[in-house]
Amino acid sequence: MKASESRYHKCIYFSSNALARKIEKLAMESWKKLGLAPSHAYLLLLVLEDPGVQPGYAAEELQLSPSTVTRLLEKLEEKKMVVRTTEGKLTNIYPTPKAKELYPQMKNCTREFQEKYQSLINEEEASRLVKSINRINDQLP
């Protein structure tokens, strides 16, 4: 059944979660070749592009709770992708050489994911959707 045919098609909760599940599935397909979940991958990309980033900043940037970032970091540490250092009260996150080697492949996964969803809903509509979602997110508490 199409989401638009559901009895809950006018409910933002239902519609946004149905979309999120479908987007998550597309993202997981794009990242599975590297053995990374999308949430781990985007955190790792942030660390690769901003070595020494602090967990609090990562949480803000990725719109995640600090405890979620901590949990993601623990998994990335297990995979030997990041190391955390403590300098006084500050914790910094750095990519490992193993993570740095993956960076080009990670950029390809990001591009492939974008191409995949744009092929399904077209580039212009995808761009409008992302802008609308961000605008609405900014309005909500």
Image: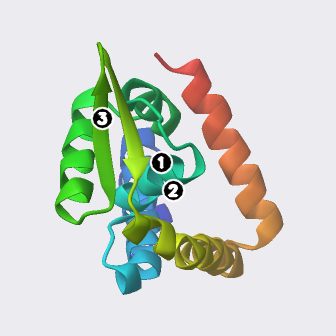
| Residue highlighted by disc 3 | 85
SS under mark 2: helix
Pointer 2: residues within 10 angstroms few (<14), some, or many (20+)? many
Q: Is residue 92 left or right of residue 71?
A: right
SS under mark 1: helix
Pointer 1: residues within 10 angstroms few (<14), some, or many (20+)? many
With respect to residue 10, does 1 lie above or below? below
Looking at the image, which residue is at 71% across and 61% down? 126
Q: Amino acid at mark 1?
A: Val
Q: In this orientation, does residue 15 appear? A: no
Q: Amino acid at mark 3?
A: Thr
Badge number at residue 47: 1
| Residue highlighted by disc 2 | 45
Residue positioned most to the right = 124
Q: How many marks?
A: 3
Which of pointers 2 and 3 lies earlier in the amino acid sequence?
A: 2
With respect to residue 51, does 123 lie above or below? below
Distance between mark 3 and mark 1 Cα atoms: 13 Å
Pointer 3: residues within 10 angstroms few (<14), some, or many (20+)? few
Q: Nearer the viewer, residue 48 or 68?
A: 48
Distance between mark 2 and mark 1 Cα atoms: 5 Å
Q: Nearer the viewer, residue 106 or 51?
A: 51
SS under mark 3: strand
Q: Nearer the viewer, residue 31 or 13?
A: 31
State the image coordinates of residue 131 (x, y, percent, origin top left): 72, 43
